[in-house]
Amino acid sequence: MKMKTYICRTAGLGLAGGLLAILMTPLQAETITITIGKGSGIMWEGAMFTETLSGPMKDPESNPYFGLLTISSSRIACDDKSNMREIAGYEAFPLKGVTGVGIVPRAIASATFGLYQGGTGSLSGTLGLPETAGISSTEGKITNKRHPWCIPATDSAQLKYYDEKANRTATITGTWVIVADGNQTNSEISMPPMYFGSYSRSPYGDKRVEIFPSNITLRINNLECTVSTPTTIDFGTMTRNTLPGAELASRSVPLTTTCGQPSNFINANINVQFRALTGLYEGEPSRLTLKQGGGYITGEIDNAATGSGVCTSTSGVGFDNKPIKLGRISDKQSNIKLTNQLTWRLCSGGSNLPSGDVDAAAEMLVTFN
């Protein structure tokens, strides 16, 4: 189930209304054993990775098959498009041993390198979700339709592009997403290793690191969870207050989670995860920034699921995709209903708090593990 989260509007000298909406997707949180259940679309997101690779290219040629920024099942080059499958509308790497399930990265990456003619080049972009595309300092926009999750520095082969002796540095940060088309059946499989690579025309210039370990097991069963909570929160009219950390408005809403497993009962924790779509305020995971800046949203879930969500606290709902445990279903229960209260607060960031309409957005994922 999906649900978008929009936050706050301001008007004139005061804040005239606030709106919070949340995009929710059933998915399963991360451990050594990843569990997904029934349903289609995004089923799980996690296994965060952050890596840096460095070293000389050792070959001056730039070739689209050897991406400077690459996520691949291969240790030496980009995956070919024929290795991918469309699953629930996503271009995914299909998992062996199960029908209709695949993995997709959600990553941002960048690189710097020496140019053959002198100077320094750069490349940056996204891999997997929301799309694979990059910007090269020498070529402009780069898309590589033949090789998914692969961003080369040039769209075509150039024999004299890199300074083969200069150091190249490539960095990446992201998470893994598991998608399914709804046809998955009870099974347990080993996940394939996946690599972040910065590949050269010469194998001696290749750099790689494993970013999805092969010792993770995927468990598929028929546990299914749904959540009921308002998709939009209107904070109403409020007075503008530029005191940093001041609470401008708050709203409490029910958060009801229902899970069922018709057969093959398992034990599982029931979680929710939040991911900021408009960013984190000053990098703080518990503060969802307004799109216009100058303020933020906090959240708090009762029954000790989170700490305090007051504006000056940093112990409330995290918007960094970490699971928040709401409860547990046992292998002796066919269904369970969890009822919580979710409190949202609109907070001032100080003198930069905007006037007029503002908004913010986050994604909420219903999870179990």
Image (cartoon, rainbow, N blue to C red):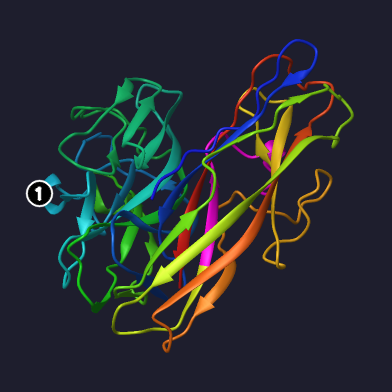
In depth, the one of 260 and 284 nearer the eye is 260
Q: How many marks?
A: 1
Residue 8 is one of the magenta-drawn residues: no
Magenta-tinted stretch? 271-286
Return the x and y of residue 362 as percentages of the image width and height. 54, 41
Q: Which residue is mark 1?
A: 82
Residue shown at 40%/46% (left/top)? 2
Image location (x, y in percent) of residue 354:
73, 18
Q: Is residue 344 left or right of residue 197?
A: right
Q: Is residue 29 left or right of residue 99?
A: right
Q: Is residue 199 visible?
A: yes
Q: Quadrant of residue 182?
A: bottom left
Examine the rendered structure and indicate whether residue 36 appears above or below residue 116.
below
Q: Nearer the viewer, residue 265 or 31?
A: 265
Q: Does the magenta segment cover residue 280?
A: yes
Residue depicted at x 22% and y 49%: 88
Q: Quadrant of residue 334?
A: bottom left
Q: Residue at x 68, y 24 (%)?
A: 17
Q: Is residue 222 above or below residue 7?
A: below
Residue that protrudes farthest toward the bottom in the picture: 332
* Residue at point 86%, 25% (across, down): 241
- Judged from this view, the residue extending furthest toward the top is 12
Q: Residues within 10 Å of mark 1 (few under 14, many from 20)?
A: few
**Can you say whether 107 is above or below 207 in the image?**
above
Question: Looking at the picture, does residue 23 appear above or below residue 44?
Answer: above
Can you give x and y, in whole percent of width and height, for residue 160 in the image?
Answer: 26, 28
Residue type pointed to by label 1: Ser
